């Protein structure tokens, strides 16, 4: 038995991630609770309440911080102060010699201090780390890949400061005015997913990638990881010969951004595009209802082509589950439709 909840964390145009998992641990003969990210700071207390309302407990066995972006990490501090968190998985760039100023990791250090003060065990999310008899496995990043991304982040940060100084830090007027109204189309318009060589940032590629293995069904949680990071994680997973035959659930990385997946990656992850009326997998994205950029229509369609039923939070709490008891107020979710892909 397991259930994975994606919680709606924002009423603004800014998306964020807050995920909770309940699953049966046969070794301990009890349910274990895992939280992956907690949205913005103000949402952390609400997430603790949500966990209590959904699972009937404020005991959280494991919390995972994927990376130190505010829409993922900031709520974890209030979660720790509002619930009984036993262990926190957290990357701290300071342990690798990088200052908060260099890689903007002050939120990670603040969270570490809060966790220690509350008696929470803090562990580095090393590749291959397992918990609960293998129900949870950290697939990435490896230490070498993480250090590579921190180094790359330094150069990206310097470059962005130069660009901001010359051109201004705000988005262009054209970008602000650009809209992404989704026009539903009746049939598959054909694959238009562009490959941009892993166009997301090095910071996003430091995201912890987590595999959930429950009831012989695999679920993959990706944070904001991009093509290089997910590829690296899949390379590690290949040695275990369990993937992707039993993959049943995938988190669309970075709220469904078109810069975090590629045709080759999705073909490896989910298989070649197929025509089927009986999808066998789910794919969720955490995205604000007011966020016009996420999830991107080409990403939604790309996952559907590969046998996924797709959903986004967009103002709602959504749940994927297997053999879990029904929950009051929850109705069966239908997949989102095909969308016009003629969008930049």
Image (cartoon, helix red, strand yellow):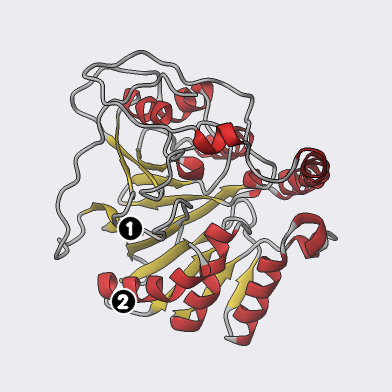
What residue would you read off at disc 1?
5
Q: How many numbered discs sit on the rendered protein?
A: 2
Q: Is residue 203 above or below residue 280?
A: below
Nearest the viewer among 169 and 81 is 169
Instruction: Name the mark on residue 92.
Output: none
- The spot of residue 248 in percent (x, y) is 33, 40
Nearest the viewer among 317 and 25 is 317
- The spot of residue 323 in percent (x, y) is 20, 55
Alpha carbons under labels 1 and 2: distance apart: 13 Å
Quick check: 218 left or right of 140? left
What residue would you read off at disc 2?
52
Instruction: Label 2: state its secondary structure.
Output: helix
Q: Residue visible at 15% across and 48% down?
A: 332
Instruction: Label 1: state its secondary structure.
Output: strand
Label 1 crowding class (10 Å Cα cut-off): few <14, some 14-19, many 20+? many
Label 2 crowding class (10 Å Cα cut-off): few <14, some 14-19, many 20+? some
- The spot of residue 93 in percent (x, y) is 75, 60
Q: Residue visible at 48% across and 62% down?
A: 39
Quick check: 291 left or right of 3? right
Nearest the viewer among 38 and 181 is 181
Looking at the image, can residue 252 be seen? yes
């Amino acid at each position: 038995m397991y259930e994975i909840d994606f919680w709606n964390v924002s009423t603004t145009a800014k998306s964020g991630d807050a995920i909770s998992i309940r699953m049966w641990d046969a070794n301990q003969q009890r349910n274990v609770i895992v939280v992956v990210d907690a949205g913005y700071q103000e949402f952390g207390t609400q997430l603790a309440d949500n966990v209590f309302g959904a699972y009937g407990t404020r005991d959280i066995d494991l919390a995972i911080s994927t990376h130190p972006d505010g829409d993922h990490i900031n709520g974890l501090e209030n979660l720790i102060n509002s619930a009984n968190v036993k262990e926190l998985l957290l990357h701290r760039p300071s342990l690798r010699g990088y200052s908060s100023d260099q890689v903007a990791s002050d939120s990670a250090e603040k969270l570490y201090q809060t966790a220690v003060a509350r008696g929470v065990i803090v562990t580095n999310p090393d590749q291959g780390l397992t918990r609960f008899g293998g129900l949870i496995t950290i697939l990435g990043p490896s230490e070498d890949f993480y250090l590579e991304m921190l180094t790359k982040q330094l150069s990206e940060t310097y470059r962005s400061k130069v660009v901001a100084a010359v051109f201004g830090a705000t988005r262009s007027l054209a970008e602000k005015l650009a809209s992404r109204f989704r026009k539903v189309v009746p049939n598959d318009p054909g694959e238009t997913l562009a490959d941009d060589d892993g166009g997301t940032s090095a910071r996003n590629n430091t995201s912890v990638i987590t595999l959930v293995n429950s009831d012989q069904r695999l679920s993959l949680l990706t944070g904001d990881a991009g093509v290089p990071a997910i590829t690296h994680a899949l390379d590690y997973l290949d040695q275990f010969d369990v993937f992707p035959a039993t993959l049943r659930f995938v988190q669309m990385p970075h709220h469904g951004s078109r810069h975090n997946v590629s045709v080759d990656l999705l073909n490896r992850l989910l298989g070649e595009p197929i025509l089927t009326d009986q999808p066998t997998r789910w794919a969720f994205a955490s995205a604000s209802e007011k966020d016009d950029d996420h999830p991107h229509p080409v990403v939604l369609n790309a996952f559907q082509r590969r046998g996924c039923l797709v959903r986004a939070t967009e103002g709602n709490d959504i749940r994927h589950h297997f053999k879990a008891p029904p929950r009051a107020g929850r109705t069966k979710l239908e997949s989102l439709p095909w969308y016009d892909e003629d969008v930049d």
